[in-house]
Image (cartoon, rainbow, N blue to C red):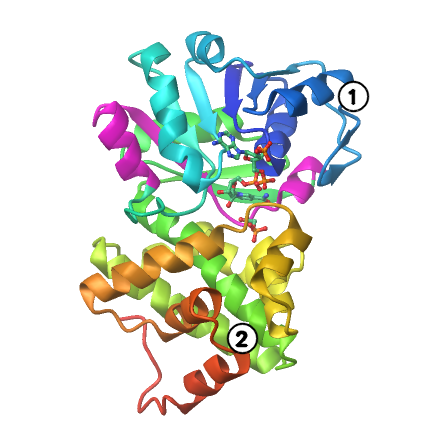
Amino acid sequence: MSPKKIAVLGAGSWGTAMAVMMARAGHHITLWGHNPSHIKQLKIDNSNVEFLPGTDFPSTLSVTDQLEETVEEHDFLMLAVPSHAFRQTLLKCKPQLKKDTIVSWITKGFETGTGLLAHEIVIETLGKDTKLALISGPSFALEVADNLPTAVVVASTDIEVATEVADIIRNSNFLTFPTKHLASAEIGGAMKNILAIAAGISDGLGYGANARAALITLGLTEMVQLGHVYNCSESSFLGLAGVGDLVLTCTDNKSRNRRLGLQLGQGKKIDDAKQTIGQEVEGIHAAREVHAICEKWSLDMPICIQTYRILYEGLAPDVAVRYLLSRAQLAEPQLD
Ligand SMILES: NC(=O)C1=CN([C@@H]2O[C@H](COP(=O)(O)OP(=O)(O)OC[C@H]3O[C@@H](n4cnc5c(N)ncnc54)[C@H](OP(=O)(O)O)[C@@H]3O)[C@@H](O)[C@H]2O)C=CC1
Ligand SMILES: O=C(CO)COP(=O)(O)O
């Protein structure tokens, strides 16, 4: 694949790791960040990026805080901002956006307040003919920045766009699989953050590996249940963006969502836990949106709801777990 010009919009750990990975593969990357002092610091010294220690920037990677000219000069955008900044970033891009620009994103979450999926926001703000794609799957920023093998899906309702994006960003350490299951990939990426908090809570309380495996399995059935609202098939959650990312973030302490849960399970207050992590914890927002969606559609998703109650209603983690255990399921929840 010949080198491309790609603009990564969002200079947090994930945008930076993706930018470095693609620049190493020979692409010409512009990394935009909204915080001028952060960008200034990166221009002076990028040898010790916060949360990505030891990540040197290749010469094919430049940084900027100028969004307008970045959008103007690129026909491939990759949004890496947190979900709460997704719509406003698209709106800021819109005036400079060219007709055939690829709008891709690596954000994981529902829109705060509306519960919309990212592709719904793209269509609402930029129109239904936008060439859009999501890149998602089990992919810790630190490991991608360290050049460790990673496999993700590139999802778009237009499989030609998914294939084009997958072909551009694939390299020997970063495998990409095109898929048309866009909504499932978005739901998987957003839901696993809530479930990673739940798994962290369970581990923080000292419940063992059996409980964690049960949470992962039953969490997957909740993911599938939510998918029914969007007409997603059960099997569409069994890939990298669903079960793959769920297993990763529920089991490894590189996950910020899991680490938040661990601290809550150990008795820490949520504000203190958030402060210790010092980065985005998307599951906190996603729990609120999923709670609202469950109310709207009368969905029974006990793990997500108990996690919401711990996060927003001050429910004690051990009480939430006892509730889950006491639900006396007559039958194991099934995927179909
Ligand atoms: N890190 C990871 O391993 C992965 C993360 N993701 C997803 O990527 C997304 C970004 O997360 P991540 O990079 O990890 O988070 P970080 O906490 O590392 O960084 C978030 C970045 O977003 C910036 N930001 C905040 N508000 C705005 C805004 N309004 N406009 C532009 N930029 C803004 C912050 O800048 P400042 O702090 O200067 O305000 C910061 O640089 C999330 O949805 C996450 O779930 C997906 C896969 C892997
Ligand atoms: O999405 C991720 C890995 O795929 C990162 O997970 P956390 O946001 O929980 O760190």
Q: Position of residue 20 (x, y in %)?
A: 65, 27
Q: Position of residue 121 (x, y in %)?
A: 29, 35
Q: Which residues are magenta?
A: 118-147
User: Is residue 225 found left or right of 237 in the rendered image?
Assistant: left
Q: Amino acid at mark 1?
A: Asp
Q: For numbered disc 2, what is the local secondary structure?
A: helix
Q: Nearer the viewer, residue 132 or 299?
A: 299
- Amino acid bearing label 2: Ala
Measured as percent of width and height from the top left, residue 37 is found at: 66, 22
Residue 137 part of the magenta segment: yes
Helix, strand or loop under label 1 = loop
Q: Earlier in the sequence, mark 1 or mark 2?
A: 1
Question: Which image quadrant shows ligand 1?
Answer: top right
Residue 127 is marked as: none
Asked if residue 119 lies in the magenta stretch, the reply is yes
**Label 1 neighbour load within 10 Å: few <14, some 14-19, many 20+:** few
Residue at coordinates 43% horizontally, 53% vertically from top-left? 285
Q: Position of residue 248 (x, y in %)?
A: 57, 58
Residue displayed at 52% across by 24% down: 8
Going 53% across and 62% down the picture, which residue do you hit?
A: 196
Quadrant of image for the C terminus: bottom left
Q: Indicate whether 71 appears above or below 187.
A: above
Name which residue lies at 42% across and 8% down.
Answer: 72
Marks 1 and 2, how far apart at CA: 43 Å
- Looking at the image, residue 164 sits to the left or right of residue 47; the answer is left
Task: Name the residue carrying label 2.
Answer: 213
Q: Is residue 181 visible?
A: no
**In the rendered image, which residue does mark 1 sit on?**
45
| 332 in relation to 147, above or below | below
